[in-house]
Amino acid sequence: MTQFHVPTDPATFVPDRFAGQVMLVTGGGGGMGLACATRAAREGAAVVLADINEEAATAAAAEISGAGGQALGIGADITSRDDCTRMVESVVEAYGGLDVAINNAGVMDGGRDGQPAPLHLANDTYIRGTIEINVLGTMYACAAELSRMVEQQRGGAIVNVGSHTALTGSVGTPAYVASKHAISGLTRAIAMDYAPHGVRCNSVNMCATDTPMLERAMEFVRSRHTEDKPDTPRATMKSSALIGRVSTVWEQAAVILFVASRDASYMTGALVASDGGWTAY
Ligand SMILES: NC(=O)c1ccc[n+]([C@@H]2O[C@H](COP(=O)([O-])OP(=O)(O)OC[C@H]3O[C@@H](n4cnc5c(N)ncnc54)[C@H](O)[C@@H]3O)[C@@H](O)[C@H]2O)c1
């Protein structure tokens, strides 16, 4: 079946679609964030990659600049409101404004030592870390971005990276599911409050995508789903998306950037499923 579902060519881009625009990508040091920033730079955006891993963000920006794009990498922990304020200040200082924000930074395990598990078995690193980074962090990032967009009075676009777990349940990872459902609510609330300011806000919700996070998730799934650890109701898990493979970062970047672009000028408050049909059944 997979021969019918050829993924987006990593080299595809729409020339000048973001020409003259400034884009911030959180979690830009790797995975999906880096793919978004790389393609957006090819499409003419000046991009700022912000990541808690400053080294990764700087290296990623250098790679984009080396290929002829305009990019800056900075360190920022989105769970700090001050960091989020400084992050947006750095964007403005470097490129004079902010037009598009992709809030992509997130974790599935709460960070170091976090262990996704059914709730009564879940440790606090997993619960608190996941909520702090995915919910509070995204909220603080949005707040800083919106302050600037309102002040600029030239509108803007925010894309929050959710997950298929923003739209449906998933076994063994309750804090992640709750955190991503919160992203859906936040996206709709921002869309309502900021439409009068010309700011659109949407979310893109993917299923398994080929990034370092997926590798960690698969390790976790393998460690739990053994015959002697039948604590997760495996029978309730779907085994794959309708498109019988995981997605690539380029497929997700294509959807995220479409939603961020003026091609999607009439979209706001939308929770876009880019999940290979996972939530269709
Ligand atoms: N990969 C998947 O299968 C998948 C599926 C659904 C949704 N997602 C979502 O996509 C987004 C990107 O995930 P990815 O797969 O590229 O993951 P990833 O782990 O490869 O990248 C996430 C990036 O976020 C950064 N980050 C983590 N905490 C941060 C913080 N506090 N402040 C700033 N940066 C921080 C990391 O350093 C990393 O560079 C996440 O929000 C994730 O929940 C991923």
Image: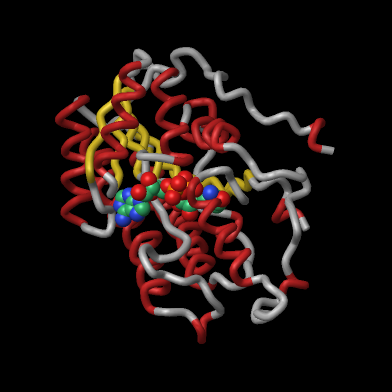
Q: Quadrant of residue 101?
A: top left
Q: Position of residue 217 (x, y in %)?
A: 55, 58
Q: Is residue 191 visible?
A: no
Relative to residue 20, is residue 87 depicted above or below? below
In this picture, residue 86 sits left or right of residue 132: left
Q: Position of residue 210 (x, y in %)?
A: 57, 43
In this picture, residue 84 sits left or right of residue 191: left
Total marks placed: 0
Relative to residue 19, is residue 177 depicted above or below? below
Q: Position of residue 76 (x, y in %)?
A: 23, 47
Image quadrant holding the C terminus, namely bottom right
Give the residue furthest to the right. Answer: 1
Image quadrant holding the N terminus, namely top right
Q: What's the image's color scheme?
A: secondary structure
- Which residue is depicted at the point 34% across and 31% down? 60
Give the residue furthest to the bottom. Answer: 120
- Which residue is depicted at the point 52% across and 34% down? 253
The one of 207 and 196 positioned closer to us in this rendering: 207
Q: Quadrant of residue 16?
A: top left
- Which residue is depicted at the point 48% across and 13% down? 15
The one of 8 and 219 positioned closer to us in this rendering: 219
Relative to residue 82, is residue 248 depicted above or below? above
Q: Is residue 83 visible?
A: yes
